[in-house]
Amino acid sequence: MEHSINELILHKSSREFNHRLVTILSSIGVWLRQSGYFEQAKLTLTCALTYNKTEKNQITLLTSIAIVSNYLNQKDDAV
């Protein structure tokens, strides 16, 4: 995954990268959570949420943030 993230960053100035930024950040956030990097996952997912423009993605991102918050015992953010 690290290699894939590095490759994505090389193309950060492309139009396609910007078009898929929320998906990229969301995927990285999920990977970080599954790898046990809960703080980093929450930051990445929160960043994705700031760039989000669709209701469907918002629900998915909020759900992912709630899952990570639960792992971090941040019950107020997990609700």
Image (tube, helix red, strand yellow):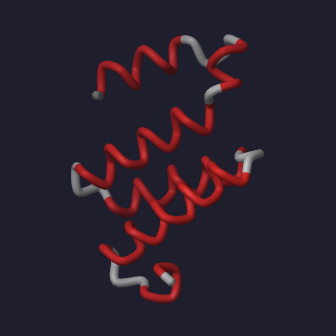
Rendered residue at 41%/74% (across/down): 69
Question: In this figure, what is the number of numbered marks?
Answer: 0
Residue sitting farthest toward the bottom? 76
The image shows residue 66, relative to residue 53, as above or below, that is below
Residue 50: image location, x then y, percent = 71, 52
**Image quadrant in which the N terminus is located:** top left
Closer-to-camera residue (67/6): 67
Closer-to-camera residue (3/56): 56
Residue sitting farthest toward the right? 53
Q: Is residue 52 left or right of residue 29?
A: right
Which quarter of the picture shows residue 67? Answer: bottom left
Rendered residue at 77%/45% (across/down): 53
Rendered residue at 54%/55% (across/down): 60
Closer-to-camera residue (60/42): 60
Residue 46: image location, x then y, percent = 58, 57
Which quarter of the picture shows residue 17? Answer: top right
Which quarter of the picture shows residue 22? Answer: top right
Q: Is residue 49 left or right of residue 68?
A: right
Residue sitting farthest toward the left? 35
